[in-house]
Image (cartoon, rainbow, N blue to C red):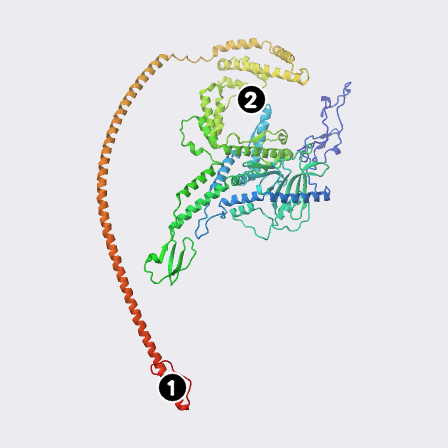
């Protein structure tokens, strides 16, 4: 974003004109000297400047502070809400057109939303995975292929892109120097503090993103500045809440990006109060139409929304699009309420000083696997079918095993006829049966179900392996390899097994870089020294450090995506540094090893020459036999003067107790200071000549002339120093440490020792060979004896088995005969009992029939007597008749 400069011109003053200098009486201005002073009207300063930026001085003038204030770091007017300042009819037309297009964007990707929902359901965590048998007791288990891949991917990704120390590291752009390195390190340290301390949601939002990324194929994060909390804020945006046009081929080049937000009434009021939204009178919003993926995720979390909408949730479209509002097509951020289609906010989305009106990024895409369209694809698209097949095969195996253990049968029910029934496994169903059923197998029959199929089990293994092959690693295969195999072979196996994950990790690395660019831009726009002081982090950071080009990058390495690969590379480096020690910095190799082992490198001894030590401390250190070093940035002339004064002092340098330890290392130290002073002054002379235009077009001749002039100046400056240094060097030779003793020529002893070792080795090998041959013969003899014993035991076992089989056959025949005789006796007894039962039933029936006829005859006789008596009494005959008794 642009920095707004205060409209005050810097006044260049001469020494005579600087504040605090009193005018000497009678002094006149130098002839021909131009007055560069300029009067500044304090009232014309930026209205946003803080009180106290200009203060009166004792001489009647004013001192103006040229530092930018907090409000002046960005032009707030350019980035304020202009929804009330544009033409209402034009804005209403644009809103209506965009809302219509957004609905079409949502409809165009309905199939994708359904696939995302199905992927969430196939994880089984919502207890509504599709498929499965319908009988009672059928298993609902789900194969954990998808959820295992998601958890594994998230763990690996978060370990690389967000280590405990922070996700940012420094990277210097262009030529390196001490100032650039220090500033880049300050920025990286401060941004790591932001990601780990100031923004507590940073890691949590990233973890949500990485767990959802494999299923959705892509997810998003949005980085913006929170005015209320005065800090940046990172928000995870699921892919089902981001709508892109059908014609878009890339997220960043899409002409329209819509973030569907669901905000409560309280959040809406807060945004209106903060000035983020215009104060628009909106009616109560209906319950939002959540996506299918969101509903499936609510089932996983065990949440269920009601129909009352107590929190006043409403749907808001935040649209990143291009509009022609201010006579030019430029990027804007338009916020629209879905239910009323009223515009709530309109912001310019480009830098004020950018003539091309390039769109500013606030949302970053994290893609899993890119495809042709704007949306990347994920595991749901790649192995969703295999996951469903694995779940189906696993359920079928468990169901068949369950059915084998739970009885399912048919049971006969008394009656003259049967019936047709529909039964489910594990049920006991009653059916009609006949009276003459006398066998239990005729009363109840188990249903023969097939056992778990070995073929189906093999198919399950194939589906699992095929699914894991998409994002598999070869780490489990490394344990089967030879421990002494070359490191290059190990690294090749790792890279081959991680080829898919490595490409995904590279995309995550690129996306994290975009996040840090946005974060650095926010710091450049909003961070002030007052904020840094109020934060209390204790970090040294200047807000202007973020104004330069981007020199911080993600801490993850796109070429290294696992600890196994990192250790393999470290092992290769250690081997090479041991084989070619002269070509490697052993300290840096050790530091890399400690970093790979997650061990702090402060365990190493301090690196010499890193601190700028004053010349007095160097004098004392050299006297105490401690090493002293020369740094290029030191004041070499001052060091030389102090060291020479110390050397010439009778109390110090000429003292016999000091000179014997001090003189020899100090002569070398003086030489190094002289050479560094020569290099420092010649480079300075060339640089000044280039700045003043005395060297044109990198002319070698002019550079040589400047260098020779600088060398001549140094020779005059150090006139007599050469003789003094030569005399000191000659004197120092008597205090030189004795050379190390020459190693003795051990070639003869080594050759003799080698001959003895070879002779001993030959004797040992001969003895070992004899022992091995003896052992082999003994083993062959034992093997022959074991074979003979085994053959004898086999013959004896065959005879015993034949005898046992004959006995078993005889016993079985006898048992079967007994069983058959018992069955015949049981059948005869059953037939006799049945016949006896039938005769008893027939006799009882005849007795009952005779008794009935007798009762009927007696009743008929009584009736006839009654009729005759009635006729006699009346003297008339009647038409009544009696029954069919014996004597009517």
- Distance between the alpha carbons at the discs numbered 2 and 1: 152 Å
Quarter in which the N terminus is drawn: top right
Considering only vertical position in the picture, is 420 above or below 149? below
Pinpoint residue 385: horizontal percent, then vertical percent.
49, 42
Pinpoint residue 309: horizontal percent, then vertical percent.
60, 51
Give the quarter of the image for residue 29. Answer: top right
Residue 460 located left or right of residue 334: left
Pinpoint residue 100: horizontal percent, then vertical percent.
65, 45
Q: Say which of 332 and 879 sits in front.
A: 879
Residue 83 located left or right of residue 125: right
Please, what secondary structure does the residue beneath circle 2 have? loop
Residue 84 located left or right of residue 221: right
Could you tell which of marks 2 and 1 lies nearer the N-terminus? 2
Quarter in which the C terminus is drawn: bottom left
Q: Say which of 153 and 737 sits in front.
A: 153
Q: Say which of 412 and 651 sits in front.
A: 412
- Please tell me how crowded label 2 is: few (under 14), some (14-19), or many (20+) other residues with Cα within 10 Å: few
Q: Is residue 200 visible?
A: no
Give the quarter of the image for residue 254. Answer: top right
In the picture of the structure, the residue carrying the numbered disc 2 is: 612
- The residue under the point 35% across, 14% down is 751
Q: Is residue 121 visible?
A: yes
Considering only vertical position in the picture, is 418 above or below 5? below
Residue 96 located left or right of residue 828: right
Please, what secondary structure does the residue beneath circle 1 have? helix
Considering only vertical position in the picture, is 784 above or below 681? below
- Please tell me how crowded label 1 is: few (under 14), some (14-19), or many (20+) other residues with Cα within 10 Å: few
Residue depth check, mark 2 versus mark 1: number of the one nearer the observer: 1
In the picture of the structure, the residue carrying the numbered disc 1 is: 866
């Amino acid at each position: 974003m642009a920095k707004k400069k205060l409209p005050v011109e810097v006044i260049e003053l001469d020494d005579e004109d600087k504040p605090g200098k009193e005018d000497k009486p009678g002094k006149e201005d130098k002839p021909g000297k131009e007055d560069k002073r300029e009067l500044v009207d304090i009232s014309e300063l930026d209205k946003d400047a803080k009180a106290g930026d200009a203060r009166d001085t004792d001489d009647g003038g004013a001192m103006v502070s040229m530092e930018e204030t907090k409000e002046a770091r960005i032009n707030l007017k350019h980035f304020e809400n202009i929804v009330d300042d544009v033409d209402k009819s034009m804005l209403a037309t644009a809103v209506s057109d965009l809302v219509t297009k957004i609905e079409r964007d949502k409809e165009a990707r309905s199939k994708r939303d359904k696939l995302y929902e199905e992927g969430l359901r196939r994880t089984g965590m919502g207890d509504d995975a599709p498929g499965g048998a319908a009988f009672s007791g059928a298993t609902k288990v789900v194969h954990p292929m998808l959820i295992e891949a998601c958890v594994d991917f998230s763990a690996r990704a978060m370990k690389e892109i967000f280590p405990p120390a922070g996700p940012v590291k420094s990277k210097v752009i262009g030529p390196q120097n001490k100032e650039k390195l220090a500033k880049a390190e300050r920025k990286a340290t401060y941004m790591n503090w932001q990601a780990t301390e100031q923004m507590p949601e940073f890691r949590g939002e990233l973890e949500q993103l990485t767990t959802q990324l494999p299923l959705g194929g892509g997810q998003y994060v949005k980085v913006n500045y929170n005015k209320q909390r005065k800090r940046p804020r990172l928000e995870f945006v699921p892919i089902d809440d981001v709508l892109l046009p059908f014609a878009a081929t890339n997220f960043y080049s899409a002409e329209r990006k819509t973030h569907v937000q669901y905000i409560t009434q309280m959040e809406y009021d807060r945004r209106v109060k903060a000035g983020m939204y215009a104060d628009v009178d909106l009616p109560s919003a209906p319950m939002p139409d959540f996506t299918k993926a969101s509903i499936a995720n609510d089932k996983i979390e065990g949440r269920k929304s009601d129909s009352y909408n107590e929190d006043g949730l409403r749907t808001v479209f935040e649209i990143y699009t291009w509009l022609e509002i201010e006579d030019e097509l430029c990027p804007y951020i338009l916020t629209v309420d879905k239910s009323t289609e009223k515009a709530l906010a309109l912001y310019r989305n480009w830098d004020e000083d950018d003539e091309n009106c390039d769109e500013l990024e606030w949302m970053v895409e994290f893609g899993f696997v890119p495809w042709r369209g704007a949306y990347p694809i994920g595991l749901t698209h790649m192995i969703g079918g295999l996951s469903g097949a694995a779940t189906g095969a696993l359920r079928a195996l468990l169901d068949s095993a369950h059915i084998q253990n739970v009885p399912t049968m048919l049971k006969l029910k008394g009656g003259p006829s049967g019936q047709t029934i529909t039964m489910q496994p594990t049920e006991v169903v009653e059916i009609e049966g006949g009276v003459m059923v006398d066998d239990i197998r005729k009363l109840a029959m188990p249903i023969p179900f097939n056992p778990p199929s070995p073929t189906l089990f093999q198919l399950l293994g194939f589906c699992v392996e095929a699914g894991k092959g998409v994002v598999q690693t070869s780490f489990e295969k490394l344990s089967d390899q030879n421990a002494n195999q070359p490191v290059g072979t190990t690294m090749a196996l790792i890279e081959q097994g991680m080829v898919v994950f490595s490409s995904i990790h590279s995309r995550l690395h690129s996306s994290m870089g975009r996040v840090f660019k946005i974060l650095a831009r926010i710091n450049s726009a909003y961070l002030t020294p007052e904020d840094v002081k109020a934060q209390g982090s204790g970090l040294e950071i200047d807000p202007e450090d973020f104004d330069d080009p981007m020199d911080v990058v993600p801490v993850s390495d796109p070429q290294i995506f696992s600890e196994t690969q990192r250790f393999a590379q470290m092992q290769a480096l250690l081997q090479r540094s041991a084989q070619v020690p002269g070509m490697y910095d052993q300290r840096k190799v050790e530091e890399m090893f400690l970093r790979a082992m997650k061990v702090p490198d402060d365990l190493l001894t301090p690196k010499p020459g890193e601190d700028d030590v004053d010349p007095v401390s160097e004098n004392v250190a050299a006297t105490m036999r401690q090493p002293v070093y020369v740094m290029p940035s030191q004041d070499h002339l001052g060091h030389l003067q102090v060291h020479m004064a110390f050397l010439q002092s009778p109390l110090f340098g000429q003292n016999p107790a000091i000179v014997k330890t001090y003189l020899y290392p100090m002569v070398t130290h003086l030489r190094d200071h002289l050479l560094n002073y020569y290099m420092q002054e010649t480079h300075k002379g060339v640089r000044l000549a280039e700045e003043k235009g005395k060297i044109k077009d990198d002319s070698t001749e002019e550079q040589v002339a400047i260098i020779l002039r600088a060398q001549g100046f140094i020779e005059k400056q150090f006139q007599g120093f050469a003789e003094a240094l030569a005399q000191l060097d000659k004197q120092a030779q008597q205090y030189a440490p004795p050379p190390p003793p020459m190693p003795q020529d051990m070639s003869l002893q080594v050759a003799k020792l080698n001959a003895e070792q070879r002779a001993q080795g030959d004797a040992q090998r001969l003895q070992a060979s004899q022992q091995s041959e003896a052992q082999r013969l003994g083993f062959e003899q034992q093997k022959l004896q074991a074979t003979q014993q085994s053959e004898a035991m086999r013959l004896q076992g065959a005879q015993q088995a034949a005898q046992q089989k004959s006995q078993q056959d005889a016993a079985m025949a006898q048992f079967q005969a007994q069983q058959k005789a018992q069955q015949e006796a049981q059948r005869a007894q059953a037939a006799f009992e049945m016949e006896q039962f039938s005769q008893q039933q027939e006799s009882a029936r005849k007795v009952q029939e005779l008794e009935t006829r007798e009762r009927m005859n007696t009743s008929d006789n009584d009736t006839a007597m009654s009729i005759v008596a009635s006729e006699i009494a009346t003297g008339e005959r009647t038409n009544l008749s009696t029954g069919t008794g014996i004597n009517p």
